[in-house]
Amino acid sequence: AQKITQTQPGMFVQEKEAVTLDCTYDTSDPSYGLFWYKQPSSGEMIFLIYQGSYDQQNATEGRYSLNFQKARKSANLVISASQLGDSAMYFCAMRELYMDTGRRALTFGSGTRLQVQP
Amino acid sequence: DTEVTQTPKHLVMGMTNKKSLKCEQHMGHRAMYWYKQKAKKPPELMFVYSYEKLSINESVPSRFSPECPNSSLLNLHLHALQPEDSALYLCASSQEEVGRVTEAFFGQGTRLTVV
């Protein structure tokens, strides 16, 4: 079963506007982490922001903020003041206990391709 | 230093070749990962090493053989690959702490083409 769901395959936003990328998740692990990564066409995965399951406040990192609604199991990424360089693929990921191994690993959603228009 | 270094960046190999992908980090992370990413798809977990021991193998074919010679290095040995194994191979590392979830840092990846 899909554990991380990103329902927006592609998004367009005008330069300088804000955009929200959606992410919902499913887990029975009480201690988990939610992450957003940016992947430009070059292929590198760039860490943007992290939210822990026990964190009381929404995470923020510069122009990035994470709208964490635990009861709804959603962790949407908000990018304020979009820039042309923000055009990339964005992945939501969850780090949780992996099956019965006692170890944690990241699983990724299908991604959202964001295009910032001038 | 928050860098994970992967070499080579690009690799073209024949189906009878043997090659290795290398990954290095000096952040003191004790968990290291290999992911495979096909075009227009999310990364898929292949292997996880924790304290230099293989802890997760996602039913990866034996033509992929991981190795963790020390806490800073992770290799992926390739032998008798198929064209469908062509993909971006990403290495990542993270801290390994009981009860604490931390971010994973990724390398730039190796773009592998099997001909």
Image: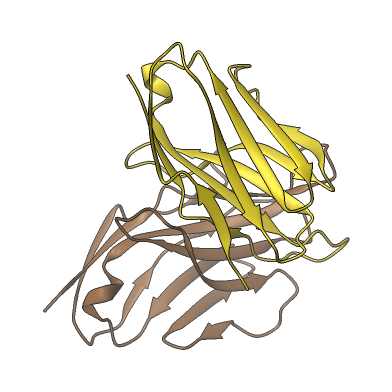
Chain colours: A brown, B yellow
Left or right, residue B84 beside residue B24: left
Q: Position of residue A81 (x, y in %)?
A: 29, 88
Would residue A56 be seen by someone viewing this image from the given angle? yes
| Residue appearing at x 81%, y 58% in the figure | B96
Q: Position of residue A49 (x, y in %)?
A: 54, 74
Q: Position of residue B76 (x, y in %)?
A: 61, 33
A55 vs A104: above or below: below
| Residue appearing at x 26%, y 67% in the figure | A87
Q: Position of residue B114 (x, y in %)?
A: 37, 23
Pick the residue in front: A71 or A16.
A16
A96 vs A81: above or below: above
B62 vs A110: above or below: above
| Residue appearing at x 55%, y 41% in the figure | B35
| Residue appearing at x 85%, y 48% in the figure | B51
Left or right, residue A15 beside residue A18: left
Left or right, residue B79 beside residue B62: left
Would residue A28 be seen by someone viewing this image from the given angle? no
Left or right, residue B88 beside residue B97: left
Pick the residue in front: A56 or A46.
A46
Which quadrant: the C terminus of chain B? top left
Q: Quadrant of residue A84?
A: bottom left
Which quadrant: the N terminus of chain B? bottom right
Q: Quadrant of residue B49?
A: top right
Q: Outermost residue, left direction?
A: A118
Query: How many numbered discs, if any?
Result: 0
Q: Quadrant of residue A55?
A: bottom right
